[in-house]
Image (tube, helix red, strand yellow):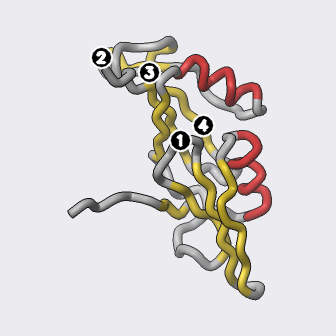
């Protein structure tokens, strides 16, 4: 039996602002934008190449906007990903790695290169470089 994670709800205060951020600055594909009356709206966005989407909207979750931390994307080339995201206007940290428990600027070894950003509400994301499949 497979249990696949396919959707994560991200709490936001302004759906249109968040939709623009995730689609224009992060490059996520907009899959769905559907409203039912004034109290419910769902916008589903998927990072390129991902099997898991995020959902933002109104009436979806009881979490406060900006409280979701630790969302993580993985890429094969963190330097190229950073160039792309900065080119989209995303404010993102330099590439960093952990060395003896401290964050050091610059790439690390396998699975140890990260960069970080937050959405307009403060929900926190990491981007991690994963080794190429062999």
Q: Which residue does the numbered mark 3 point to in the structure image?
A: 113
Where residue 20 sits: x, y (%)?
77, 51
- Which one is in front, 52 or 102? 52
Quarter of the figure that contains the C terminus: top left
Mark 1 near mark 3, Cβ–Cβ under 8 Å?
no
Indicate the quadrant where residue 90 lies: top right
Q: What residue is drawn where x is 68% and y is 81%?
A: 40
Kindly check if marks 4 and 2 are in contact, taking CB atoms under 8 A apart as contact.
Answer: no
Residue that badge 2 annotates: 100
Residue 34 position by quadrant: bottom right
> Where is mark 1, residue-wise?
49
Asked if 71 appears above or below 74 in the picture, the reply is below
Nearer to us of marks 3 and 4 is 3
Rate crowding at label 4 as few (under 14), some (14 to 19) or many (20 or more) other CA atoms within 10 Å. some
Number of residues whose C-alpha sits closer than 10 Å to that of mark 3, classed few (under 14), some (14–19) or many (20 or more): many
Quadrant into which the N terminus falls: bottom left
Counting residues from the start of the chain, the first of labels 4 and 1 encountered is 1
């Amino acid at each position: 039996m497979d249990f696949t994670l396919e959707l994560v709800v991200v709490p936001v205060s302004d759906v249109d602002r968040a939709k623009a951020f995730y689609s224009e600055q992060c490059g996520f594909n907009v899959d769905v934008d559907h409203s039912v009356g004034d109290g419910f709206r769902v916008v589903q966005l998927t990072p390129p190449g991902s099997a898991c989407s995020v959902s933002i909207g109104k009436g979806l979750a009881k979490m406060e906007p900006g409280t979701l931390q630790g969302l993580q994307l993985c890429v094969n080339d963190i330097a190229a990903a950073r160039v792309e995201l900065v080119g989209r206007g995303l404010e993102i940290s330099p590439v960093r790695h952990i060395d003896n428990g401290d964050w050091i600027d610059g790439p690390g070894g396998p699975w140890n290169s990260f960069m970080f950003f937050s959405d307009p509400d403060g929900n926190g994301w990491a981007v991690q470089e994963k080794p190429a499949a062999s």
